[in-house]
Amino acid sequence: MKCYHITGSFFLIMLLSCSAPEHAEQHLPPMPVIPSDKQVTYQQMEVIGFIHFGVNTFTDREWGTGKEDPLIFNPALLDATQWVEAAETAGMGMLILTAKHHDGFCLWPSEYTEHSVKGSPWENGQGDVVRMLSEACARAGIKFGIYLSPWDMHEPSYGSDDYDNYYLSQLKELLTGYGTISEVWMDGAKGENAKDMEYDFNAYRSLVYALQPQALIFSDVGPDIRWIGNEHGIAGITNWSTINTEGLEIGKADTEYLNTGDPDGTTWLVGECDVSIRPGWFYHASQDTLVKSPEYLVDLYYKSVGRNGTLLLNLPPDQRGLIHSNDIQSLKEFRDILDETFKHNLFREGNAIASGQWSKNPGFDPQNLLDEDPDSYWAADPADADPWITVELKEKLTFDRLMLQEPIRLGQRISEFIIEAEKEGEWKTISTGTTIGYKRLLRIDPVTVRKLRIKITGYTGTPALSTMAGYNASSREKIF
């Protein structure tokens, strides 16, 4: 029904008609802790990229010393567009640049130090890597983020009370000179000479939100995105997006707690699973043959995105300023495998029935699980202690991958479930799991059945699901 602004004697009638539709829109009451819109949008990207690049690229080191001569930085073929194209090949929605690593060398011409690209021969000292990448991302329509290391081995004020002002000054340069910043990556890296110094993270965060209110901030303890507790790219088999941050400190948080989250958590922090496509974070020619295979990257996707996290994959440019062809080939095949596996949902034409639903409004019908719309969902009857959903297919089909999703805008609820298939008239368990959240991917032995059932055996609030889908894996997938 369309409603129009009118005048005259029919105004009241039309107003009542417009405000009282035949089926008033209803929503399942949200959980006490829910994500912000920008957290939901962030997680929907699923895979994002990290770019580690700097003087370490030219010294063949992972960590610098702060004493490197800027003259060594000279990536003669640097092409930020090539970096973005590599990211797009893998389906990444954002690139985060190490604008300054622990060595203190700045990839932009900072006013506050000479230890930067302006002291290098690259672009005759007129270059700006941060600008090149931010503009390349903008042209391609992908998001851009920054990492500004709090540890600075070169800066003389590091370790003193004056250092926070230095850090804030550089952070302000990055937040005001390079367009939209979508993520600011923070960690607690600290040098031996700064044991008694405390970084003023509250001031850092306040500046980010003041200058780039749409940005998300990553750290061990958020406040928007949390570290998953390891650098292997793997989320916990159980992974809650909720967590308690009270008493947690950056650099000192329990990694197991970060890896699993907390069903009683009071803060929503998406788990970000960081890992490099190579053994190191910076480029080393000796690792050209050690690039993670496409199959390995697919496995990481299942263990990060498929466990309610996001995958942050590092792509280190080489001394030319280009991402190596071996890395690009692996990224391409990684995305090809995923696209092949998930191109056709075998449950799309099925019929779903449930033990009950939250209300008789069609907005909560179990059929919503099969429409591939993450914003439509089924919600259980609160009075049903053992809710279940059965999907009946038009014919027997073979599948070996399952995808489940919750409507996370309303929070995370499900803590345990069982998947059963009807075989010769009996229900047989084919998989079990714990948390679901944004996405749970299950790799199972191939089954050929017509009926499938999910039984929700544990939950912290009225269960709700937005997706239940089945797929056949690409022939190139391997189970690790």
Image (tube, rainbow, N blue to C red):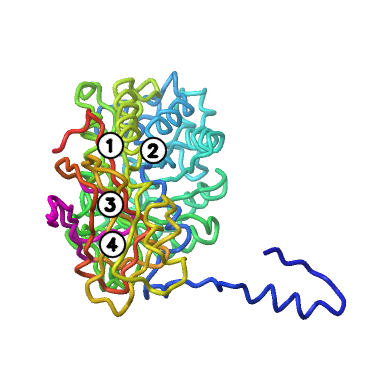
Labels 4 and 1 touching (C-beta < 8 A): no
- In the image, which is nearer the foreground, mark 2 or mark 4? 4
In this view, 266 is above or below 318:
below
Residue 280: name its quadrant. Answer: top left
Range of residues picked out in magenta: 415-442
Q: Is residue 254 visible?
A: no
N-term mark: 4 or 1 = 1
* Spatial separation of the CA atoms under disc 2 and disc 4: 56 Å
What residue does disc 4 label? 389
| Three-letter amino acid code of the residue under disc 4 | Ile
What residue does disc 1 label? 64
Is residue 243 found inside the magenta-colored segment of the image?
no
Is residue 420 found inside the magenta-colored segment of the image?
yes
Tell me the quadrant of the picture where the C terminus can be found. Answer: top left
* Spatial separation of the CA atoms under disc 4 and disc 1: 55 Å
* Spatial separation of the CA atoms under disc 4 and disc 3: 47 Å
* Spatial separation of the CA atoms under disc 1 and disc 3: 13 Å
Residue visible at 19% across and 55% down in the picture:
236
| Three-letter amino acid code of the residue under disc 1 | Gly
Q: Is residue 385 visible?
A: yes
